[in-house]
Image (spheres, rainbow, N blue to C red):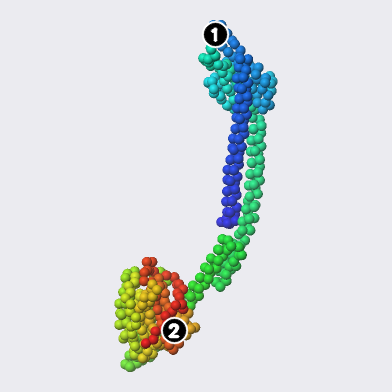
Amino acid sequence: MTSLRTRLTVYYTCFFALTLLILGLGTYFLIREALEQGVENDLRAGTHQMMTLYEAGQNRSLSTIVSEDGKVRYEARGELTQLFNNPMLVVQVFGPEGRLVGRSPNLENQQVDLVPGWRTLDAGESLVLVQDYDGTRLASQITPLVANIVDQNGVIVDQQIVGILQVTRPLIDVDKTLNLLLLILLAVGGVALLITPLGVTLLSRRALVSIDQVTRTAQGIVNAEDLGQRVPEPDSNDELQRLTVTLNEMLARMERLFVGQRRFVADVSHELRTPLAAMQGNLEILTRGGIRTPELLDETLTDMRRETARLIRMVNDLLLLAQSDSGVELRNEPVEVDTLMLEVYRELRPLANGVALRIGAEDQVVINGDRDRLKQALLNLGVNALQHTASHGTVTLSLERRDGYACLSVADTGEGIGSDDLPYIFDRFYRADRSRSRHRGGAGLGLSIVKRIAEAHNGYATVASELDRGSTFAIWLPLSAEAPLALPEPMVSPETEALPEPMTA
């Protein structure tokens, strides 16, 4: 498997080579086009100069030829070519039949043949062609020379082609320039392609040093199994810095999850051990003869039923929390919250045991949600309040509209919760008074379920409490919930902000 540095070097080199090829070809063809256009301009300028001389002295530039049948025809003379002086161009004048009649002095005794296709030209037309002549490329422009035939009144009655003007330019300088340009492009491109891989390798190595450091640090964290370590963040505000921040946030989240998982497993093991140990002790009693004593048998079976019921409640609560962690969707249907509160009130009355259970504020509220889950959350709050309120105390259920939320609150006049315990009261298996809670059968899951159900309905749970004055737990549910209901990831709820005051009788 090739390394990232090698792949970057190959990719950048190929991209640079393609760029050089495109730029080189573009430069070559643009310059060639410019040079060819310059040649055509030279040919046109030379042709224009000769045509001007011809038209100015047309009468002196024509020879009259009488054929055997008595017809008179005219033929251009070549004397005017002697007046042409341009070292880059040579000029030739041919008769109507293609016979050379004149040439410029710089051509000396040499002759350049007429360009093929000259017989097809009419008056006013011209033709530019490139041909090889003795190993040299020549660009030529041929133009017919036309004489106007006039009558006795000076009126033009006919036009006659009396010769062919050919202006020729050697392309030696153009070819040398193009060859030199091609050589320069190939040389520069070759050197650039040789240097590019080395430069890309050095630059990529320097750019990837920080990534290597991040990789080594991450591997060290994995090998040491220490999620408390963090990757050093670079000072630069770039993609690498953002990657490092993201990795550190991921490590922090993983650390919280692993710590929570270990604590969860430890708490579950601890909670399951107590009822299982009690059931094992009762079985030992029965095995040693307790089954033959009716009173002892009844007491033992009662204890075992109580511990079995406790295990069932704990397993059901754990199943609900597991479903919430997996994001199980809830039913989304209209729920009359005031009617739901009355049902919970009726179900809690048999459990009051001397505690005054009351209904406080009762606004009529309808929200969208899962009725069974909301009922379970309110029952958990009610049972929790009754367990922590002494006889002759008061537990009050209330429903109010507040700031776009339906506030379901359960207030008691019980023992209250210390300020040190309030931040953790909704954590799983957390109990402010472990000995009394376990004695009453609680596993520390009820309030955690309340919080999760509230968050699943896009709301949150709060608590306000003072020692020896009582506590008020509240579930805040939005009155208009358009988002789909699903048990979300744990979120931070405002448990200590804007809390209602504890309600007393």
**Location of residue 397 in the rendering, given as x and y in whole percent from the top left corner:** 35, 82
Helix, strand or loop for disc 1: loop
- For this orientation, the residue located farthest to the front is 153
**Location of residue 467 in the rendering, given as x and y in whole percent from the top left corner:** 45, 87
Which label was assigned to residue 437? Answer: none
Q: Is residue 338 above or below residue 201?
A: below
Q: Nearer the viewer, residue 17 or 363?
A: 363
Q: Which residue is mark 2?
A: 465
Q: Amino acid at mark 2?
A: Ser
Q: Which residue is mark 1?
A: 71
Sequence-wise, the earlier of marks 2 and 1 is: 1
Query: Which residue is at a point 54% across and 8% down the rendered structure image?
Result: 71
Which quadrant of the figure contains the N terminus?
bottom right
Q: Is residue 7 above or below residue 117?
A: below
**For the residues marked 2 and 1, what is the alpha-carbon distance in whole angstroms?**
133 Å
Q: Nearer the viewer, residue 383 or 61?
A: 61
- Kindly tell me whether residue 65 is visible in this rendering: yes
Q: Amino acid at mark 1?
A: Lys
**Location of residue 141 in the rendering, given as x and y in whole percent from the top left corner:** 59, 25
- Would residue 376 be found to the left or right of residue 23 on screen? left
Q: Is residue 103 above or below residue 235?
A: above
